[in-house]
Image: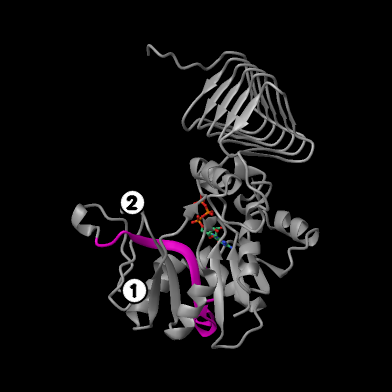
Amino acid sequence: MTEAILLVGGQGTRLRPLTINTPKPMLPVAGVPFTVHQITRARDAGVTRIVLGTSYKAEVFREFIDASDLGIEVVIATESEPLGTGGAIRFAAEHLTGGADDSVLVFNGDVLSGLDIRGLVDHHERTRSDVTIYLTPVEDPRAFGLVPTDQHGRVTAFLEKPTTPEEIVTNNINAGCYVFRRSVIDRIPAGRVVSVERETFPGLLAEGALVSGVVDAGYWLDLGNPLSFVQGSRDLVLGHAPSPAVPQHGDFLALAGAQIAETANVHGGSVIGRDARVAEGAVVNGSVVFDGASVGAGARVRNSIVGLGAVVGEDVELDGAVIGDGAVIGARNELREGVRVWPGVHMAECSVRFSSDG
Ligand code: GTP
């Protein structure tokens, strides 16, 4: 197996407003676009050719790939209309060169994992499966569709999100990485929207195909929402998540041209982007400050994302907030859990505060 499809065409709605200008897989995580972590992991697992299934903001991928050498052949397939996960796999497969029985690795563009990719492919080929799905156990499976398997590792059903305790028959969920036999991809309908999770996989089970599940309890994170995005970045910087694109781990990562004042305290796996600035006495903990952004004196930034060129004023407190590109947060504002500021918004000094006495 030497070929893979990486799905990167989604709109990334849960990560708005960061994804208004930049598609989710191109957002910088630990110094490089997130997709680079995935491509280099696939490369190191023996994949030599990868097709990027793009749709939303495809030109951003094209420019980046044209200017990069990731040590692997990268081909870009662009849907004129988004085709959904299954439709995108079918469309991208036109660019594969392998035969009908060859294995094709397929993965979602927002998953950070420590999966043994080679092991997944070996399992697929040893069991002669039609599709093999990477499953990960989660503590609270109520927010996910469940994927139970029998004692031989054969997937027995694809269940909707459980609503009662009795419906939680397993803690294993689809972890967003698959191996397909090429001929199975060719049977996905072409030219229309298809969901691989809701249509292709249940359809395969219904017709008696061999769908295997491989449970891997190692590191897994879906970087689809702001809190998990900062967590993924933090885990890469601290070395809790594996990636060949992070050569060195530490308490924080400062990219070229970043200026951090001596009395500032940057820690907890934070990233300070290119030419970004952190002023005197500011504390940046477990956060991501994008290129060209600035954090004012005495500001406290925790579990937050500060967009490209955004300005965080003096003594501002951010906790679990997302600041869009170019936004300006005036001095002494307090923005907490879930607050999202849209690109270019200017927030006056001291206009939002949380009072401890309610
Ligand atoms: P949300 O809108 O926040 O849910 O994020 P998303 O757009 O990434 O959707 P989701 O997480 O469900 O998508 C799973 C994976 O499939 C991601 O890597 C997406 O980039 C990708 N994807 C989803 N829809 C399409 C599509 O129509 N075309 C392509 N090429 N990829 C898609």
**Residue 204 visible in rendering:** yes
Magenta stretch containing residue 172, yes or no?
yes
In the image, farthest residue toward the left? 166
**Residue 193 visible in rendering:** no
Q: Given the image, on which type of amino acid does mark 2 rest?
A: Glu
> Which corner quadrant of the image does residue 152 belong to?
bottom left
> Which corner quadrant of the image does residue 229 belong to?
top right
> Which one is earlier in the sequence, the residue at label 2 or at label 1?
2
Residue at image mark 2: 139
> Which corner quadrant of the image does residue 244 belong to?
bottom right
Q: Nearer the viewer, mark 2 or mark 1?
A: 2
Q: Point out residue 263 in the picture as x, y percentages from the top left corner.
A: 68, 21
Q: Point out residue 324 in the picture as x, y percentages from the top left corner.
A: 62, 34
Q: Quadrant of the C terminus?
A: top left
- Which range of residues does the magenta coloring cover? 169-193
Please rate how many residues cluster around mark 2, counting C-alpha atoms within 10 Å: few if below 14, some from 14 to 19, many from 20. few
Q: Is residue 248 left or right of residue 236?
A: right
Magenta stretch containing residue 186, yes or no?
yes
Residue 155, numbered label = 1
Residue at position x 44%, y 61% from top? 175
Residue at position x 57%, y 52% from top? 11
In three-dimensional space, the C-alpha distance between marks 2 and 1, rounded to whole angstroms, equals 20 Å
Q: Quadrant of the N terminus?
A: bottom right
Q: Given the image, on which type of amino acid does mark 1 rest?
A: Val
| Helix, strand or loop under label 1 | loop
